[in-house]
Image: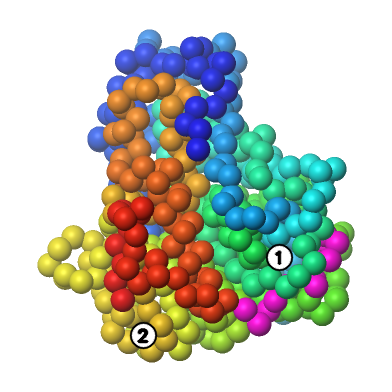
Amino acid sequence: MSRMVNSGHSSHIRHSLGRRGLLVGGLAAGLGLVVPGTASAWPVNPDRFRGATPDGAVRTKDDPDFHPVKFRLPEPTGRKLLGTTSIHLIDAKRPDPTMPSGKRELMITIWYPSTLMDDKPLAKYMPKRTATEVDDTWTGEYGLALPPGTFDFANTVTNSRLNAPMQKMKHPVLIFSPGYQYSRFVNTALAEDLASRGYVVVAMDHTHETPTEFPGGRFLPGVPPTQPSDPLFTRQYVDTRVADARFVLDELTKIAAGHRPGAEGNELPTGFGLGLDLRQVGMFGVGLGGYATAATMRVDKRIAAGLNLDGTLQDDRLKGPPAEVALKGLDQPLLLFGSDETQFTDPKKDYFDMSWATFWAAQKGGKLNLNLSGSKQKAFTDYQFVFDQVFREIYGDDPIITSVMTALVGKVKPDQSVRAQREFIAAYFDTTLRRRPNQLLRQGSPDFPEVHVRW
């Protein structure tokens, strides 16, 4: 994976020690914001970071030293060509008076194995309004000492061709639920890699919580990034995500049966419905999405296997109590893949999660625990390489990058983290859905020393 992008502009955007100090100082003195379903807080101080120059002025898009930074997604490792499409869905059974239809509305994006169609354009990473919102979150609300517009999500190109035909064979289906407040797009790299290995990956935005952009430009920003966590809201969010996942699975079933999907105006890629194997369905998610995965599996047996990426299984991570799925376990297999901020073996040590310990004891289906050593929760998202590339574009090889990356995603190297997650996650779904056992899950590998395996 390239660590430098837009290298021709590097000399124009490298910043002085004054701005470098802002970044370090803010991270060191920052405010810890804890959000539901995450492992812990991350340090941020919105008042310290406003993209200031050494003389205290604020950098803007008009500054001659400024340019938006595109980033490069790691290339998928599978053999399949990739297509992607987005679908607007309306759940007629759930009222929502805030929506034009009066019903619950969702957006999903799907990555899938495709046939060769060079005339189809490569998809952009995010639609424009969503891209602006996510950039504003990091350069404004969380304040990374970068001017608004730094993260050029809207013009970054993915590895998937827009609305390319589906490959003419059946593929297992994986439902994805993002982290709390996170867009469905910030796990695109993992979704693309799984699709390149023969899976159909369906990512949901959870309207009113995660930022959601509908056809025609209608946009809902979701929960404000600075909203404090509340166990009552956490339970509501999880219940809503469970209902969303079950509805999406219902809609996929209709599509596979030849019915037109969702709202008016939706057009499916050629052969799409015929490519869905709904006898082999898995689900995975990050943080709150991992919690929602387990909760959905408890009530919907159509989901044969699940993966929880660093998500606590209780509404209040510190106080509990463990959720019903943790207390009773599941009949289906669930993989717990944690960062260094989640451990359940020693109550006397930091980051102990009682819900994981409770689930481990109660689980009836298959169970597996992986730990990504040196990581924080955002290492399970695209931010692990987005931050790395953007900071290197701005600061070059300045040692400050190590400190900033450690504060945000942990000490694990982004390229190695991406490789390790791809191999273990694919091995898990290959084993549980395709019945292709992989020794990697039994004993790990010296190629991935940062991943520890526990049965």
How was the colour assigned to the protein in this rendering?
A: rainbow
Asked which secondary structure carries label 2, the reply is loop
Q: Earlier in the sequence, mark 1 or mark 2?
A: 1
Asked if 303 appears above or below 114 in the picture, the reply is below
Classify the position of the C terminus by image quarter: bottom left
Circle 1 crowding by C-alpha within 10 Å: few under 14, some 14–19, many from 20: many
Asked if 91 appears above or below 27 in the picture, the reply is below
Residue contact between numbered discs 1 and 2, judged by CB atoms under 8 Å: no
In this view, the mark in front (1 or 2): 2
Q: Quadrant of residue 448?
A: bottom left
Q: Amino acid at mark 2?
A: Gln
Which residue position is annotated with label 1? Answer: 105
Magenta residues? Answer: 268-280
Residue 195 versus residue 177: which sits nearer the camera?
195
- Judge left or right: residue 351 versus residue 10: left
Q: Residue at x 34, y 22 (%)?
A: 398
Q: Amino acid at mark 1?
A: Glu
Which residue position is annotated with label 2? Answer: 363
Q: Residue at x 36, y 19 (%)?
A: 19
Residue 235 versus residue 251: which sits nearer the camera?
251
Residue 27 versus residue 221: which sits nearer the camera?
27
Asked which secondary structure carries label 1, the reply is strand
Task: Residue 346: tell me if it is visible.
Answer: yes
Circle 2 crowding by C-alpha within 10 Å: few under 14, some 14–19, many from 20: some
In the rendering, at what x and y percent does residue 200 appear? 66, 65
Q: Residue at x 84, y 66 (%)?
A: 271
Task: Residue 315: tell me if it is visible.
Answer: no
In the rendering, at what x and y percent does residue 139 appear? 48, 33
Q: Quadrant of residue 61?
A: top right
